[in-house]
Amino acid sequence: MKTNQVVTPTKPLRQFLSQDLEIDSWIKIEPFFKELKNRKINSTIELEKWLTDRSELEAALSEDFAWRYIKMTCDTSNQILTDAYNFFVSEIDPHIAPYSNELNIKFVQSPFLKELDNTTYQIYIRGIKKALALYREENIPLQTKIATESQKYGAITAEMTITWEGKEITLQMASSLMKDTNRKIREEVYHKIQKRRSLDTKTLNDLFSELIQLRHQVAVNAGFKNYRDYKFDELGRFDYTVKDCFHFHESIAKEILPLAEVSDQDRKNKLQLDALKPWDTDVDVEGKAPLKPFSSATELTEKSIACFTKVRPAYGAYLEIMKRMGYLDLDSRIGKAPGGYNYPLYEIGVPFIFMNSVGTHRDLVTMVHEGGHAIHSFVTRDLLLTDFKSTPSEVAELASMSMELISMEHWDVFFKNADDLKRAKKEQLDKSLKTLLWIAAVDKFQHWVYENPTHTVEERMENWKNTIDQFTSKVVDYTGLDDVRARGWQSQLHIFEVPFYYIEYGMAQLGAIALWRNYKLNPEKALDQYEAALRLGYMKSIPEIYKTAGIEFNFSQAYVKELADFVKSELEKI
C-alpha cells in the first residue's frame, strides 16, 4: 500500500448519540446515561447492543476530553484552553462516575452476562468487577481535584526557560546543547538548566505534597492501607504483584548497572577526563558534532513516514494520515507543555502525536516511539468496544518501544552517512539499557513515597538521593551537585500526573529487546507476531499478549541478563 493512496478516515455514523452532539454541558449528556440505566435488556443480543451503545458514549466523551487536553498542552499560556479542560474535569467528569458505577452494576447483575462469549469479554468483565470494588462516591470530588492539580505540573515546567546567546530557549532546546563538543559550553548550560529548575523546587514539592495527601485519602476511602496498593488495583495489575516490581528493581540493579559502568568508564577514557561529570554523558566520545537526523518538524514528519514505510508500508500510511489530518504537533516552543505523547482518539480511531522536537537524535527516538503507539491505535480502531482498545501500559509501551528498535534497521532514511548511522544505533542501544536504571529508580521511589505518605520534604529528597544512588553509575562524578541530585525526580512528569505508570516502560523495554531479537532473525514473522499481539487490544491477559508477540512477559534476573547480553553483543557488532 502506497501512502498517497491512503483514504483519510472519518468518524463512523453514530448509532446511539446524535451526530451533532456538542459536549458543552452535563444537561446534554445525562439523558444518554439515563437511557442506558433504564433500558430493559431481554436477551444476550440486547445486552451486546447495550454494550456497544455505552461504548459509543464513552468514545465520544473520551475524544472530547482528549482534544481539550491536547489543545491545553499545545499552549499552556492560553487561559481559554485551560478553562475548557478544567470545565470537563469539574463539570462533566464528576457526573459521569456515579452513572458509570450504576451501569457497571447493571451489567454484572444481568442474567445474560454468563451467556456472553467468554473469550471476547473475559478481560472486560474482570475490569468492570474491579472498578465496582474500587468505587466510592466520596472519592469523586477528590479525584476531580487531583486531575486539576496534577495538570499544574505542565504549566509550571512549560514556563522554564534559560537565556542562551541572547535568546530565550526552552529547557528541551537547552538540553540539546549537552551534545556540544565544547565542554565549557556543556557545563555552563547544565548549570543554567539546574539553576532554573531550582527556582521551582519548592513549588513542585508543595504541589507533590498536596497530591500525595489527596491520593492517600482516596485510597483510605476505598479501604486500602496506602495509595500504592489502591493504584495497583486501579491500574488493573492482575498479572503481577508488588513483589514482582521489587524483583524487577533488583534484576536491573544487578545486571544492568555493571554494564552501564563499563560503558561510562569507556566514555571517560576516550574523552581523557580526570572526572566524568553529568554534562559529559551525552557528547560524542570522538569529538564529533551532535547527530542531526532532521532540521525541522516537516522534515521529521517526512522522514518518519519514509522510515515506517520501509518497516511495513501500512505503518508509513498511518503517519501520512495523521499528517494529512493535522494530528501532529512536533516542534518545541515556549508555552508548550513538556514531554511527548500519542493520544488515542477512540471515536475517529486516528491518534494525535505531541512532542517537543529540536532536531536531536533523541527527538527521532521519541517520534518512532510515539509512532509505535500510533500503529497500535490504528490496528485496534475497529474493535467492538472502546474498552477493548484501551490497553494496559505494559502492552501499550511494548508497541512503542519495539518500534524504537525495529525502525532502527531503517534509520538510513535519517542518516545518509554510514558513520552517523552507526553512532545513532550505538546511542540507541546504550540508552535502551541505561533507561532501565532510571525506570527502576522512579518506580522504587514511588513505592516509598506512598507507603510513607506523612514523610517530610526533606525525607523525600533524601530518599530519592538514596534510591537513585542504587541505580547510578559510580563512574559519573556528582561532587558538589547534591541539591541537583535531590530534586532529580522533579523532572519526571509521570510522578506528578500519572503515578506508578512508569515501570511498564521497563517491562516493555525487555519485551521490545526480545521482539527486536526475533526481528533480526525473521523480520516478516516478527512483524506478523507484533501486529497480531497489538490487534488483540485488551481482550487477553498481558502474558497471553506477549506470547502472541512471540516473547515472554518475564523480568527475572536470568531473563534480564539474557537480553542484556544480546544487546551487548549487538553493540559489539556495530
Image: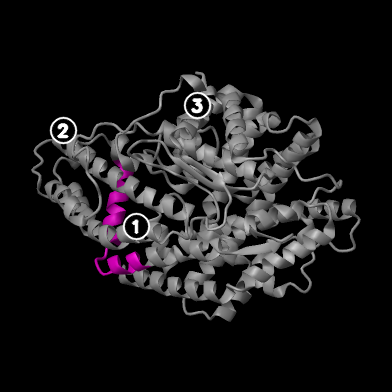
Rendered-image quadrant of the C terminus: top right
Whether residue 184 sits left or right of residue 253 in the image: it is right
Question: What percent of the width, then of the height, locates residue 377?
Answer: 43, 37
Q: Report the front residue among 298 and 402.
A: 298
Cα distance between the residues tagged 1 and 2: 38 Å
Quarter of the image for residue 413 reads: top right
Q: Main secondary structure of the magenta part?
A: helix
Residue position marked by numbered label 2 in the rendering: 45
Residue 451 placement (x, y as % from top left): 48, 71
- Which stretch did the figure color magenta? 122-145
Identify residue for label 1: 84
Q: Which residue is mark 3?
A: 317
User: How much space separates mark 3 and mark 2, taking CA atoms?
Assistant: 36 Å
Which numbered circle lies on residue 150? none
Q: If you read the primary sequence from the N terminus, does the residue marked by circle 1 or circle 3 appear first?
A: 1
Amino acid marked by disc 2: Ile
Residue 43 highlighted magenta (yes or no): no
> Three-letter amino acid code at disc 3?
Ala
How far, Cα to Cα, is label 1 from label 3?
A: 33 Å
Residue 256 location in percent, x, y?
70, 52
Occupied quadrant, residue 142 = bottom left
